[in-house]
């Protein structure tokens, strides 16, 4: 595959995204994302990225909080990195270095995207390998972070209301990088890393005590499994 022919977005698992309630929310290009000398070769890279949001989850949380939970709670992205010259045309001794450089830039871009949606305390917690659907081996970086869940206010009477103070909650994420058909693919995302449970007790009068409990029923293990499946389906 030539560099010019490959300069296109990656293919994503459309059926799985549609079935899971994911919607395309935008894409972006970095061309060139970087230019660097690797041994005897000068390499430039172009990034073409697609981004999706789990709208089913967002709508569910909005409904459970009477419209007060706003934000992007679960994201998935996929990037094709086109190299010039293409990866297959580089000396074998240089390919590993090029992949490492791409991964470094991809991690920086990913962490920047998380910061753009108000995710904080972003940390890389480990690396592992996984096999994607095309049979290739991908290197995965695991992430943990936090995000602020804003206070929620519920009316009690026409004159009184409950306010549940905001808190910080865990976010889990992953980023995978692998070689595919002369290009490099990068895919990953982020999702709630724990269930959100909030409670408050108020005494609107001396004779009345009222408690409000919120359990959003989030399932981090299921989100992680779905994200891994989406990542594996990119090509």
Image (spheres, rainbow, N blue to C red):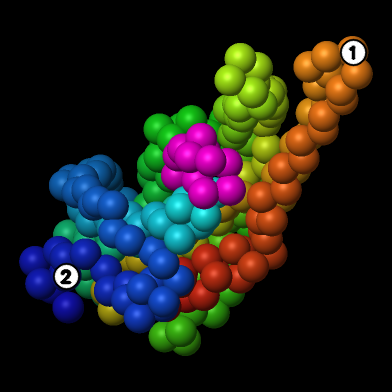
Residue identified by numbered label 2: 6
- Position of residue 229 relative to residue 79, above or below, is below
- Position of residue 103 relative to residue 200, above or below, is below
Which of the 4 quarters of the picture holds residue 220? bottom right
Which of the 4 quarters of the picture holds residue 108? top left
The quadrant of the rendering that contains the C terminus is bottom left
Q: Nearer the viewer, residue 179 or 14?
A: 14
Instruction: Judge from the rendering whether residue 119 lies leftward or rightward of residue 21; answer left or right.
Output: right
Q: Are marks 2 and 1 in contact (CB under 8 Å)?
A: no
- Position of residue 214 relative to residue 98, above or below, is above
Q: Residue at x 69, y 56 (%)?
A: 217
Q: Residue at x 83, y 18 (%)?
A: 203
Instruction: Judge from the rendering whether residue 42 lies leftward or rightward of residue 135; answer left or right.
Output: left
* Main SS category, magenta section: loop
Name the front one of labels 2 and 1.
1
Magenta region includes residue 10: no
Instruction: Name the element at disc 2.
Output: helix
Could one spot residue 186 in this view of the protein? Answer: no
Q: Nearer the viewer, residue 60 or 117?
A: 60
Residue 206 numbered mark, or none: 1
Q: Nearer the viewer, residue 31 or 75?
A: 75
Q: Residue 113: where, in percent of width, then height? A: 40, 40
Q: Residue 228: where, in percent of width, then height? A: 55, 69
**Disc on the earlier residue, 2 or 1:** 2
Q: Residue at x 62, y 39 (%)?
A: 145
Range covered by the magenta-colored residues: 62-72
The quadrant of the rendering that contains the N terminus is bottom left
Q: How many marks?
A: 2
- Position of residue 160 relative to residue 18, above or below, is above
């Amino acid at each position: 595959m030539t560099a010019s022919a490959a300069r296109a977005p990656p293919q994503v698992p459309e059926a799985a995204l549609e079935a899971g309630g994911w919607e395309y929310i935008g894409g972006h290009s970095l061309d060139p994302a970087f230019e660097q000398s690797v041994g005897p070769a000068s390499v430039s890279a172009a990034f073409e990225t697609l981004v999706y949001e789990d709208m089913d989850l967002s709508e569910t949380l909005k409904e459970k909080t009477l419209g007060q939970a706003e934000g992007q709670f679960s994201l998935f992205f996929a990037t094709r990195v086109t190299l010039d010259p293409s990866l297959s045309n580089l000396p074998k001794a240089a390919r590993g270095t090029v992949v490492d450089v791409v991964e470094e830039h991809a991690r920086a871009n990913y962490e920047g995207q998380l910061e753009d949606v108000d995710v904080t305390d972003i940390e890389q917690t480990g690396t592992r390998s996984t096999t994607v659907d095309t049979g290739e081996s991908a290197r995965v970086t695991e992430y943990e972070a936090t995000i602020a869940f804003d206070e929620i206010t519920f009316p009690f009477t026409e004159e009184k209301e409950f306010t549940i103070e905001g808190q910080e909650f865990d976010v889990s994420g992953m980023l995978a990088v692998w070689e595919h058909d002369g290009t490099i693919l990068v895919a990953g995302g982020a999702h709630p890393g724990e269930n959100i449970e909030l409670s408050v007790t108020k005494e609107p009068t001396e004779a009345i005590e009222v408690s409000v409990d919120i359990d959003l029923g989030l399932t981090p293990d299921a989100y992680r499994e779905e994200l891994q499946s989406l990542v594996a389906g990119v090509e």
